[in-house]
Structures are given as C-alpha cells and as structure tokens.
Image (cartoon, grey):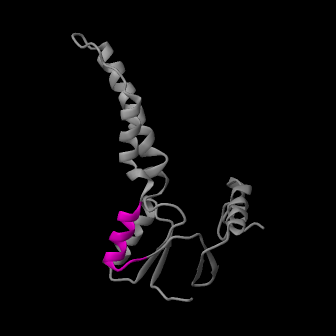
Amino acid sequence: MSESFDAVVIGAGPAGEVMVSRLHAAGKRVTVVEAELIGGECGYWACIPSKTLLRAPEARIEADRAEGVSGAELNWPALRDYRDYMIRYLDDSGQVRSYTNQGVTVIKASARLSGPGTVEAGWSDAERRAHGHRHRQHPADPADRGPGRRPGLDQP
C-alpha cells in the first residue's frame, strides 16, 4: 500500500516528537514511523529509568549525612515499581492514541529512505539488522567529513 504525506518523520524520540508536532502545527500531513516506543530511548530505557533508580540512593546518602535525620531505608521493590510507573510500563499506546486523534499517522515499523522522496516502512528483522550493522561499521572520522560526505551513509 502506498500513501502520500507532506512529511515522514523516522524515529519518535525527543527530536522526532518535536519535528512531528511542529510540522503538524504548520498544517502538514505528517506520519511518524517508529520501530520501538514513541518517546525513544531516553523515556523508556535510558534517562528516565536510570535517574529514577539513582535518586533514592542519593537521597538516602544525603539523609545519612544530615544531622538529626536517621533511619532512611531503601525499598527496592517500591523503587522498581516507581520506575515502571515512570516509564509507563513500556506502553506507548497513550502517545499513539494522542497522535492519531490529532490526525498524525503512526506506523510502528522500521523504515528506510528508498529513493528521492520515498520512505519504505516495515522491514524484516534481517533487513533491520543489516541496516543497523552498516551504520555502525563506519565511525565518524574527521577525514571523512566535508561537502557531500556522510560517514556511515555514503560508504558501502
């Protein structure tokens, strides 16, 4: 099936979400393609869960150092449950529903640029692994930078 959009945003991490909302606000017909969860790595696997887990031990250490405070204890099961709450139990259905209600098309799949003005969504696992591997093979080297040079993209 082929559809046309004014803009296709590949990846719905923080930058992708800003791009989608600005394009939509400008009256563009937008789709967002995300293989994982709307919100990206930070909200589900990196920044939010790690900071949530780090804050309680930090507070305990501060309490232990404060005069007149005693008995600060860590409750790891409660902390784990709070982390799960903070990362929405790895459920982005609310964000998907919000975009859909606004008229933004959400495609939960991998995507690639397949030609000028063309994006393909819905790679197989093998294609996704090959794509990811190709991009990790070429570290950014200052010698590769320059007009028309995109390390990891232009090289075979």
**Vertically, is 34 above or below 88?**
below
Who is closer to the viewer here, 1 or 77? Answer: 77
Which residue is at a point 49% across and 48% down the rendered structure image? 45
Residue at 64% across, 69% down: 147
Give yes or no for residue 55 being in the magenta stretch.
no
Give the residues drawn in magenta, as a range.
Answer: 92-105
**Where on the picture, by quarter, is residue 135?**
bottom right
Q: Residue at x 48, y 46 (%)?
A: 46
Q: Main secondary structure of the magenta part?
A: helix
Residue 150 drawn above or below residue 62: below
Q: Nearer the viewer, residue 147 or 17?
A: 17
- Residue furthest to the front in view is 77
User: Splitting the image into 4 quarters, where does residue 24 fall?
Assistant: bottom left
Q: Please determine whether, in this image, residue 107 is positioned above or below residue 61.
A: below
Question: Quadrant of the image for the N terminus?
Answer: bottom right
Query: Where is residue 85 shown, x and y percent of the image?
Result: 36, 46
Residue sticking out furthest to the right: 156
Q: Nearer the viewer, residue 100 or 28?
A: 100
Q: Position of residue 81 (x, y in %)?
A: 38, 40
Residue 156 placed where, x, y %? 78, 67
